Image: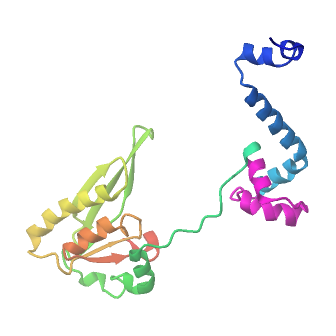
Amino acid sequence: MRSVGDRHGLQPAFEVLGLPRSTWYYQTRRETYAEKYAHLRAPLEAIAEAHPEYGYRRATPELRETHGQRVNRKVVQRLHRLWDLPLKRAVRPPKPSAIRQAIQVAGARANLLLERSKAEIGPVEVLYTDFTELVYSDGAAKAWGIPILDHTTKYALGFAVTARANSELALSAWTEAKRCLRAWKDSLAETVVHHDQDPVFTGYAWTGELLADGVRISYALRGAHDNP
C-alpha cells in the first residue's frame, strides 16, 4: 500500500510522464552543480571565445592565471561538457613522413631543376604535373583534373579527371603518360617528374610507383613558384 507521500509526491508524476526517478535526480544534481560553479561560466566562455583551440586542459591554467580562479581540471572538464565548451586536448603535430623528412634533409637538392638549364632540356626528359580544380554547371559543381605535361613540347602525355584529388587520380594520369612515353623511348630511367609537395606527391603510393618505373622525382621548394 502506498504512503501518503507516494500518492501526493513526485512518484505519480514520474509514472504519468514515463520518467525514471533516477533521471530526475540526475538532472537536479546537474543543475545544482551548475549553480555551484555559476561564477566560472563567464570566464570560461571568455577563454573559449579568445582561444577556441583550447580544451579543458589548457583552459584550467588560463582560468587560474588570467581570472584568478583555482579549480581542479576535472571540474573544468565537467563544466565544459555542461556548457558545451571545447573539450579538445592539446594534440602534438604529426611526425613528418619519411619522404617529407628526406625532402627536408635534401633541401635545395630536392629540386632537380635548379641547376639545370631549361633551354637544354630535350623532349620527354622533364615532366610537370599538378592538380587543377575544374568548376562547371555555373559554379554549382567541380571536379579535379591532373595533366602530366612535357617541358619541351608542352604536350599532355597523360590526363585524368575525377571528383577528388587523390593518389588514384594521379596514378591514373601517370599510367596514360607511361603509354605515351614508351612510344618515345625504351626506358624511363633519367626521366624527371617535377611537382610540388602535395600530400599525394609525397605519399608512398605515388613515389613508390614512379621509383619502381625508374623515374627521378623532383620537388618544388616554393609551391607554384617552382612548378612551371
Can the viewer see residue 150 in this picture? no
The answer to whether residue 69 is magenta is: yes
Q: Is residue 210 visible?
A: yes
Q: What's the residue at 81%, 59% (across, down)?
A: 72
Q: Position of residue 92 (x, y in %)?
A: 59, 68
Quarter of the image for the N terminus: give it.
top right
Q: Quadrant of the C terminus?
A: bottom left
Tell me residue 219's x, y (percent): 37, 76
What is the magenta range?
A: 51-80
Left or right of residue 199: residue 210: left
Vertical placement of 6 versus 216: above or below? Answer: above
Q: How is the image coloured?
A: rainbow
**Which of the 4 quarters of the picture holds residue 148?**
bottom left
Magenta span: chief secondary structure: helix
| x 45%, y 71%: residue | 223
Decide if residue 11 is on the left or right side of residue 208. Answer: right
Residue 153, located in which quarter of the rendered image? bottom left
| 84 or 172, nearer to the observer | 84
Q: Is residue 12 left or right of residue 174?
A: right
What percent of the width, then of the height, locates residue 169? 30, 55
